[in-house]
Image: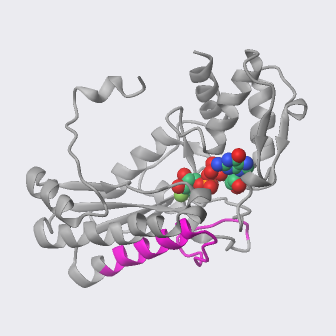
Amino acid sequence: MLTNHIFDSIKLEYADMLDMSSLCRVIKLFKPDEIYNLAAQSHVKISFDQPIYTSEVVALGTLRLLEAVKLIRPQAKVYQASSSEMFGNSIDEDGFQRETTSMAPVSPYGCAKVYAYNICNNYRNAYGLFISNGILFNHESPRRGINFVTNKVAREAVRIKLGKSKKLTLGNLKATRDWGNAKDYVYAMWLILNQNKPSDYICASGISKSVEQLCEYTFSSLNMDYKKYVTTDARYHRPQELNDLKGDSTKLLNIGWKAKYTFEDTIDEMVEHWLN
Ligand code: G4F
């Protein structure tokens, strides 16, 4: 199991972003110094099918957590997992998104994340709580769900290579994403929360690739031509697409963050996982 190395060192407790009393209970129980809010229905396409549930968890769930912190543990530092999906199709003239780029989300998930981002800033300013937003661009690892495009492509390319599958069916191949490695981005979360003052930071690789380029690299790493195997189907298209993401992490680099892994390292790691 992917989590075996850590299971003995963590204590799990039940709580639910829909149930504020359960959030209060675990905060009372553990009296945390740092809280990382990564809870979400985080799949963008599913957020079109379940917009109310997504908003309840992502938007109001964050508010419930902040209220619980304000009432019970106001000295705790809170990290909020904000997302590049908040920008929608808003891009600065030089092709990058940064902390100052306007937000124009194009999915129910993105809209809910904008609410959460704003309520975090509101609670920081209104109540003096230590709350920081990490605005993370796509970050991947073998633990990524197989309904997200990187792991879907890695898994299916390996299955095709091993003769267990014949085709990979995707949606929009033209969209571009700024893909980084989850290990680098988790370090960024810790670094963001361990500054003297709360603030908001972009975390991204600064390199953008299309879904088609992702397929090209993954299949060629297994000595295959993706064009022979990849097809598209409208069922994987979104009602509205976020076309291009490329983040400028200058502010984060200035507090000492540096990515250790490239896009290619990350895809290789995922392919290796499925091969094993
Ligand atoms: O892997 P994806 O589903 O990730 P997406 O939508 O960019 O969202 C991820 O990153 C966000 C950060 O920007 C997070 F906030 C969010 O929670 C999540 O982790 O899709 C990436 C791209 C999209 O353009 C999508 O349309 O791949 C395209 N795509 C093409 N075919 C596909 C598929 N995506 C999926 N999931 N499945 C396909 O078959």
Give how far across and how far down residue 68 sits, in percent: 19, 68
Quarter occupied by the C terminus? top right
The residue at 58%/27% (across/down) is 269
The residue at 22%/40% (across/down) is 12
> Does the magenta run of residues contain 115?
yes
Horizontal side of 108 relative to 223 (left or right) equals left
- Disc count in the image? 0
Query: Magenta region: which residues?
Result: 94-122
Is residue 162 or residue 129 the one in the foreground?
162
- In this rendering, the answer to whether 61 lies above or below 183 is below
Where is residue 214, by image quadrant? top right
Give how far across and how far down residue 250 sits, in percent: 54, 60
Horizontal side of 159 relative to 196 (left or right) equals right
- In this rendering, the answer to whether 215 lies above or below 46 is above
Horizontal side of 173 relative to 84 (left or right) equals right
> Does the magenta run of residues contain 232?
no
